[in-house]
Image: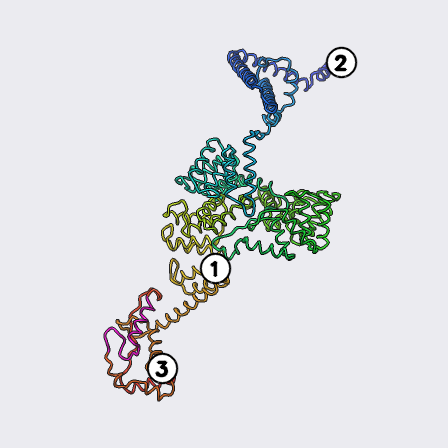
Amino acid sequence: MGRKELCILWMCVCLVACELLGPESRKESEKSEDEDDIVESLDTNAQGDSDYMKQLTEAVNKEILTLQEYAEAFKKTKIEPKDEDNNKADSQLEQMEYTLKLLKKSLLRHTEPTWIHDPKDGDSTASELEKLGEHPQDILNTLPPLPEEEEVELTPELKEAKELYDAATAKLRRRSPDIRSAIMQVKQSADRGYIPAKIKLAWSHVFGEGVDMDIEAAKAIFEELAEQGNGEAHAGMGFLYATGTGVPVSQAKALVHYTLGALGDSDFAQMALAYRHWSGVTVPSSCPKAMDLYMKVAAKVASQVSASGGPGVQRARLLDEEAAGGALDTDLIEYYQLLAEKGDVQAQVGLGQLHFQGGRGVTLDMNKALHYFQQAAKTGNAVANAFLGKIYLEGGDGIKPDNETALRYFKKAAELNNPVGQSGLGIMYLQGRGVPKDTTSAFKYFTMAANQGWVEGQLHLGFMYFGGVGVRRDFKQANKYFSLASQSGHVLALYHLAHMHAQGLGVLRSCTTAVELFKNVCERGPWSSRLMLAHAAWRARSTSSSLLQYLALAERGLEVAQSNAAFILDEGVVGPYPPEQRYPRALQLWSRAASQGCAAARVKLGDYHYYGLGTHQDLDAAAHHYRIASEQLHNAQATFNLGYMHERGLGLARDVHLAKRCYDLAADTAPEARLPAALALARLNALVALDQLYEVSVPPRAACRVPRAACYVCCYMLRPGRRHGARGTPARRARARPPQRARRARPALRGECAAACRVPRAACCVLRVLLHATTWPPTRRPRHACPPRSRSPASTRSSRSTSSTR
């Protein structure tokens, strides 16, 4: 063979070797070598840590055996359990067993398989382990859900107590309830051990509602139930410590009880704690915490409200009750009933709406609403037909829902272009009740109703845009219609609008706006009826009961309750509190109400700092509060007060021009301020005119204290010719004048005006009293005398000629 052939043969052998030992084979060989190294290292580590692994294995095995023994003991301790309890225990044991299996699987992934005692589950364990991810959350996701907590079955005695309590609460919801008999039933239920009845009885002792006011008895009930972990009892103790009712004031203890009550799902504690986090009362201000707590309470309120909206809430403000119109009295209700019986359609419709929606001293009563609407519908009234459709659509109070009847009434109202009827037809088409489901027709009717300003049409349009039902989802349009519906105070509109602001759907995310909306929803809960009860107690002269009821609502954060409680304290009613705490407590409540935007409370804050009530006198602080109420809240009283302070130079720079401007603004702000502003402007103009005359340079005299301008006026008005009724011709006036010699011979007395002055001494004394220094500018002026007068006859004649010319 030649050299060339040997080279070619060698190259062929190399090529074959390269195909057999390529890069993949090299990687596999490296991988196998690495695995061998790992196994060797694991073997060496296992041999080195064999003692540690044995101890760990024994500890885990012992723990698993302990859990199994606990499960077996748990089964044995159950003596003849009931079926429900047995099923519940079995489900708990199954969940515990499944958790133990997962624990074994997780241990198997990182340790030896000798920990598992049951080798039969090896294949299934391996297959399940492959399905599980590496993240621990994957293991937690495989756990079955926890069993829902079921209500504890009541004993026969507690069932009777519950029936008594339900009957008592039904009595309290009437328009004219028999409170004493209802509370007696609550007491009977509480004596049998029913916890909600005990809570109700404790609050009745606090408010003096149906029973004598007994703070100690209420405190004993709250303490007993708080030791058992009851959330409402913790809320009651928090109220007592926060307001110092029956116990010393302790905001720290109140905060602890409110926190425990909020954890126990007490709506009172959750609202009180949310208000403190929102306004920064005794805790650092935290918008997220306030929103979280308000959201929980708002969800409860929204779940109890239908699409028609909740009952009306009348917020009577005691400070300006006459301007607000006051509540409807029983006499006025009876007057409307008389008109309705005589066939007045408007009275029938009005009474029907009052009983349908509630509020203004009238409770919900569907049967009475149905009666009045049926009478008005006979005359073809569109509103009555529409509300009859709503009653038959929703039902309630023994009235069965009837879709056909509701559809008939809605069509009659819609034909008359009534927005309530149009909205009702939209609901029926949207839900397919009595008609085929048609979102297009529903959207059409809702739009027609919304264009006429009906709140339910706006609300359902918001729902359709929010959920994309029948239309393309549009959060901006949903926000628009929810905002329109919320202007009428609809609870569901406020609730959904709050969620949109909290999550940033269609609008920029705003925690502050969401908290304010959630707070508004919470204040429309069932407890808002306490406002009317407190107002009724105030009108019945039960001032202490009214004060405590308003204080309880003030702890929830209701601004109207805070201002009303402060007003009662300001009137001199202190209730169970010491008299010296009257103004400090009122000042605290006025401050909380003012921070929520109450203009009257802001003015009261200024008054308290101006007069030094409950705090030291501070004119600068008073002017600060008046300025906020005037510029931001446009309060006429605050603007008038600023003008007075500018006029007098009290706490502000003395400036008559700013004072006049403030008086003019006050007159323009409110019609009732025009008369006081006109009087103040007249006084201001008179003082300015007198001040200008006062600046005329006249030779001073130390004796006289009468201002120069007043002296000029008196010299003219009280001259001899005008006294004793001397009028008419110059001859008569000449006869009335005293002789010239007598006037010249009048001696100049020390301490009076000059001899030429004709002002009587009594008139000077009266002027000195009327024109006291308090009504004159505070700067000290030089004393002066009347202008000297010449004694020569020539000068007398010249002065007479000048005066006659004038």
Residue visible at 36% across and 48% down in the picture? 580
CA separation, marks 2 and 3?
164 Å
Residue 79 percent location from the top left of the image: 56, 19
Residue 389 percent location from the top left of the image: 69, 48
Task: Please state the extent of the stretch shown in magenta in the rendering.
Answer: 748-772
Query: What amino acid type is highlighted by mark number 2?
Result: Glu
Label 1 Cα neighbours within 10 Å, binned few <14 / some 14-19 / many ≥20: many
Q: As rendered, which of 636 and 321 lies closer to the eye?
A: 321
For numbered disc 3, what is the local secondary structure?
Answer: helix
Label 3 Cα neighbours within 10 Å, binned few <14 / some 14-19 / many ≥20: few
Labels 2 and 3: the sequence-earlier one: 2
Horizontal side of 418 relative to 360 (left or right) equals right
Q: Which residue is identified by label 1?
A: 636
Query: What amino acid type is highlighted by mark number 1?
Result: Ala
Would you say residue 27 sits in the magenta stretch?
no
Q: Which residue is identified by label 2?
A: 5
Horizontal side of 15 relative to 595 (left or right) equals right
Q: Which residue is identified by label 3?
A: 725
**Can I make out residue 512 in this image?**
no
For numbered disc 2, what is the local secondary structure?
Answer: helix
- Looking at the image, what colour scheme do you see? rainbow
The label nearer to you, 2 versus 3, is: 3
